[in-house]
Amino acid sequence: MCGIIGYTGKKNAVDVIFKGLKKLEYRGYDSAGIAVVIGKELQVRRSVGKLCNLESMLKKNPIIANIGIGHTRWATHGKPSEKNAHPHTDPTKTVVVVHNGIIENYSELKAELQKDGQKFESETDTEVIAHLIKKHYKNDLLNAVQKTLDRVRGSYALGIMCKNEPDKIICARQDVPLIIGVGNGENFIASDIPALLPYTREMIFLENGDIAEITSEKVIIKNAENNMINREIKNIQWDTEQAEKNGYKHFMLKEIFEQPHIIENTFRGRIYPDEGRICIEEVDFKEEYVRSISDIYIVACGTSYHSGLVSKFLFESFAKIPTEVDIASEFRYRDIILNEKTLVVVISQSGETADTLAALRLAKSKGCQTLAICNVVGSSMNREAMHVIYTHCGPEIGVASTKAFTGQITVLYILALDWAYKRGTVALGELKKYLKELWEVPLKINGFLQNVKSICDLAKIFAYKKNFLYLGRHVNYPVALEGALKIKEISYIHAEGYAAGEMKHGPIALIDESMPIIAIAVKSKVYEKMISNIEEAKARGGTIIAVASKSDKQIRNKSDYVIYVPETDEFVSPLVTVIPLQLLAYYISVLLGCDVDQPRNLAKSVTVE
Ligand code: AGP
């Protein structure tokens, strides 16, 4: 996620801003920049890569000012480069902008401005905002920003300055956090608390639709209806570490709770359910090519492999494309039969996993088209694959992958539907229905996350068990695998994920009173089969924890414990059923005193074989 910091006061703004950007480094970034107003001129410094590159630029060519804005960029539109780094100005260098979020309609706005003869420097959505504000500027920056935001659709946290109004910063917030830090004779803006803590604990958390005008002495806030409002000034007592976790005890828990937001961030600007429209900026798979795909090979490791297994059902059921999924460390040593009509999809949060990278290179050597589903812009896989689609999860700090899994499934669900529509295997009406199902998921997960006490209670009951069995069918079989992986890697308890239909072929022998069985049995075409498996396991003394649909009235009589999850269409249910399994693993790990964010023997990215 991008980071924003702004300052106005008596200190050297460049110094305050640079230190603030350092505090936001944990959010991940690939470029950075600072803009200040000196006299009646804007000065901008930007660099790709780490902050040390910006620092050496500033040392070589120092600037002193009392007002400025800074930015660390986590690329979504446009590769990491100096030109795409923020801040962005309009061509006359009158207005300068830093932005966190996604402007959904930036392409049409950009085309409109280009038609007026506007020249663009970058590939970003953000630069459009600078051009629009200049277009609307009539010696009233606040008003020009308001007029601009009336045209903009999407999510944003913005910091804006204008050389003609050198004493003020305008900021605005829609769906992306933005905080005002209140000082004594100085004021700040920031994306997150850590950047402000060295200077002030008095903070205002802007709400959606808010726009504010900040000088060193004054903060004026207006709401979406242009009425002046008072937002509460909160006193924040967190230390920096607590602030980086946004108050959560571990990054993993923070990232579990971020999932509604990252799913929304990943589909934002890409799906329009009411129109039945899909638009994935990074790729432009024409209908002719999509119809020519003979088969898909999905290759990944660990959690990414599990999201690939989910997508197999999506590509086959929606797009009717034969789809194989393989573990990268196996794929790369097979005498695999691939042809130029095979599409090889690699899935990787880090984009650096050695086996997956090797599989990608093998696929390319066989003349296949290749697509990478990555979370990290500028990673090896996204440089080497022919096509790339990003999950917009922001950096995943916890070694145990959570939001990357749901972000990957979100991308693959959209892609499978896009290709199904292009291949004529899903009609417009169905497409709208399935897109609406995805659109509603973030709200449903948010609702579920409001009360997770029951899962915490289950963790207390089962934390000292020595084995777990996770069962699922169809799209929730991979979720069973994922649930088992989570508890293994952060609690060090042995667990197996199994296709429930396989029970009779061996694993049922494992079941006795000491074996808890987590059965994913949400309403679906395999629900009755799951109930039979639950009854088989119960009959042999197993303790059943069922993950069930909220409306299910009968499953309580079949199970010892039930975790109810929101109703969804079965194809999108993995986004919901995985959440309680992530939380169960998390709470058990905490109870056992394990190192949740840095489990023993594990690395976040396995860059060696
Ligand atoms: C999942 O919790 C693990 N951290 C691990 O299995 C991970 O998913 C795997 O190493 C793949 O990583 P990648 O997505 O970065 O390629």
Image (cartoon, grey):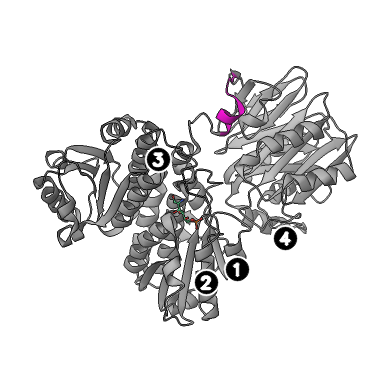
**Total numbered labels:** 4
4 vs 2, front mark: 2
- Circles 3 and 4, Cβ within 8 Å, touching? The answer is no
Q: Do the residues labelled 4 and 2 touch (CB within 8 Å)?
A: no
Residue type at tag 2: Thr
Measuring 71% from the left and 27% from the top, which residue is drawn there?
188
SS at circle 2: strand
Q: Mark 4 points at which residue?
A: 115
For marks 4 and 2 on the same chain, the one whose residue lies earlier in the sequence: 4
The quarter of the displayed image where residue 590 is located: top left
Identity of the residue drawn at 16% across and 42% down: 555
Q: Can residue 16 be seen in this view?
A: yes
Residue beneath label 1, please?
384
| Label 4: how many Cα within 10 Å (few below 14, some 14–19, many 20+) | few
Which residue is labeled 3 in the image? 443
Q: Name the residue under label 2.
A: 370
586, 115: nearer the viewer: 586
x%, y% of residue 472?
25, 54
Q: Does the residue labelled 1 lie within 8 Å of ligand 1?
A: no
* Pointers 2 and 3 in contact (C-beta within 8 Å): no
Query: Would you identify the image quadrant in which residue 513 lies?
Result: top left
Badge 3 density bin: few <14, some 14–19, many ≥20, Cα 10 Å: some
Along the polypeptide, which appears first: circle 1 or circle 3? 1
> Which stretch appears magenta?
235-244
Which amino acid type is marked by label 4?
Lys
Q: Distance between the residues labelled 3 and 4?
A: 39 Å
Residue 242 sits inside the magenta stretch: yes
